[in-house]
Amino acid sequence: DSGVTQTPKHLITATGQRVTLRCSPRSGDLSVYWYQQSLDQGLQFLIQYYNGEERAKGNILERFSAQQFPDLHSELNLSSLELGDSALYFCASSVGSGYTFGSGTRLTVV
Amino acid sequence: AQSVTQPDIHITVSEGASLELRCNYSYGATPYLFWYVQSPGQGLQLLLKYFSGDTLVQGIKGFEAEFKRSQSSFNLRKPSVHWSDAAEYFCAVGAGTASKLTFGTGTRLQVTL
């Protein structure tokens, strides 16, 4: 157990739908990062939050959004889903010495 | 912009043989370098990291990596591979301990018995 908890582990949904992925960072970690892993794009950085504020943004689509709550958990919202959004979505957290990844949410859009 | 190149997509080694996975990075300042391993259907596990200091870094599971600034490389090594090491290995670079990571495309390691 890495200490970073992601739910759900698997999600199957239809095109056009909206889903929410949840991440609870390790205790004490203030930064949360979201990554997307797909066969064609590899591991891509989506967005980073630090203590509730957006810190950095990567290759995140406008249909995607995220937030970090006062208890430091984060949610990634994916809307108007397309087949190409099928991927493994990872959350990571860090403070100081490095990053710890969660086990990911596998999203399948059908 | 930072980038990582892992030139080997797939490597096959025999159990007990030595292993070296290559990683070249591009970054304008002193990089923070990482190696992660991912087993099928699993998350990313940190093998080792380099921030500063000794350029030979020891990690978990008997892995080590050497930072060579002149070659912009951070190759991962293991003297004797075990069948359980079969997985995908990712090299990553970051600007610091609280910044995003840029990953390479990964090297899939197959171990033959």
Image (cartoon, coloured by chain):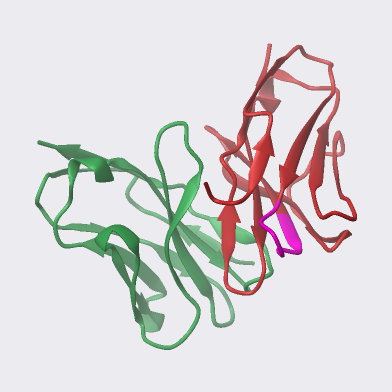
Q: Residue at x 68, y 11 (%)?
A: A110
* A30 drawn magenta: yes
> Where in the figure is residue B55, as x and y percent of width and height?
36, 83
Q: Is residue A106 magenta?
A: no
* Residue shown at the point (84%, 16%) measured from the top left: A16
Residues A66 and A102: in front is A102
- The green one among the chains is B
Q: Main secondary structure of the magenta part?
A: loop
Find the magenta span and give its range: A25-32
Give the vertical position of B2 relative to B18 (above or below). Answer: below
Q: Compared with residue B79, is residue A17 higher up or lower down, i.e. above or below?
A: above
Task: Give the chain coloured red.
Answer: A
Which x, y percent locates residue A57? Answer: 79, 55
Side (left or right) of B9 relative to A54: left
Q: Where, by quadrant of the figure, is residue A94 drawn?
A: bottom right
> The C terminus of chain B appears in which quarter of the rendering?
top left
Whole-percent x, y for residue B102 in the image: 58, 58
Residue located 38% across and 69% down the image: B74
State the image coordinates of residue A96 (x, y, percent, origin top left). 64, 74
